[in-house]
Amino acid sequence: MLHSVCLYTNKRKDRGLTTSRMIVESVREMGMEIKAAPDIAAELGLPAFNSETDNADLAIVLGGDGTVLKAAHMFSPLGIPLLGVNYGTLGFLAEIDREEIRRSLELIHTGQFHIENRSMLNVIEESENRPVIALNEIGLFRKQEHGVVRLAVYCNDSIIGVYACNGIMVSTPTGSTGYSLSAGGPIVDPGVDCLVITPVCAHSFSARPVVVPGEAKVSIQVVNTPSGCSLMADDIVYRLLSDGEKITIGKAAPLCRFVRLGPPDFYGQLGAKLMEWNNISAEGSIT
């Protein structure tokens, strides 16, 4: 049985925090303690969750996939499972829609759920004070206003290739339906233990995505860059790398834990989401 909840909301999606207030009311009716992320706590009249001192049995995340990714950075190192509530366009990472919140909370409160673990990535031996961790992907990318970069890619110290491109990313199976998919990478069942290396806009017909074992260490070295390569993880820019610098990416120790209310149906969800994606793209309104 759950005792404590943290609410993490994208305020641009839940305008006026209407759904957030409903969740607060429901959680309190069930006798559970609730805190909120610092940016919304005061508006909801709740204590602010402190990731350095607090813990919770569950984090409820309202927003799209981008919001879930940000929440994963905050809660996964603490071992707190996420319940994603879809407020976005596609919602690959969300478990429920807004209309299902009350019923879902009742099921979760009585223990009628299970946990699905998803692997995460980090940059090994990164010298920066800010650890680089990701649920979807980590990569090096050119600065938008400049030309292509040349990047060398290694798997366990064996060279895969040198690419003139806009960037190289390493993604988890979870991330295979994100940026990697848009860049031509394969769709990977989240139960497969692997990493996907995807070149972005490579200037070569021979440049193709490569799937490597999940325990592999993938290094990306800057061979040549006009003005630096951005180290990015889940769309967050961490720092710039210059010629000769290298990062090494591998699986992170923490797992991202997702609350699931029913049996896994990756392929059913995939078909529905890709059909929805096609329809939105055809209408020209995807953002």
Image (cartoon, rainbow, N blue to C red):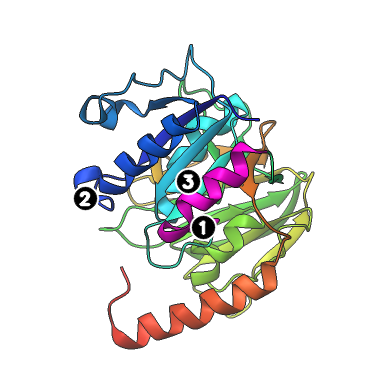
Q: Could you say where residue 241 lies in the image, as x and y percent from the top left?
A: 43, 39
> 151 or 95: nearer the eye?
95
Of badges 1 and 3, the one in the foreground is 1
The amino acid type of the residue labelled 3 equals Leu
Visible residue check, residue 35 = yes
What residue is drawn where x is 53% and y is 62%?
92
Visible residue check, residue 239 = no
Q: Is residue 233 above or below residue 207?
A: above
Say which mark, if any, is on residue 96. 1
Q: Is residue 27 above or below residue 277?
A: above
Query: Which residue is outermost to the front?
Result: 29
Tally of numbered discs: 3
Say which mark, if any, is on residue 15. 2
Q: Which residues are magenta?
A: 94-110
The amino acid type of the residue labelled 1 equals Ile
The amino acid type of the residue labelled 2 equals Arg
The kind of secondary structure the magenta stretch mainly shows is: helix
Of badges 2 and 3, the one in the foreground is 2
Would you call the spot at circle 1 few (<14 residues within 10 Å), some (14-19), or many (20 or more)?
Answer: some
Q: Is residue 213 magenta?
A: no
User: What residue does disc 3 label?
Assistant: 69
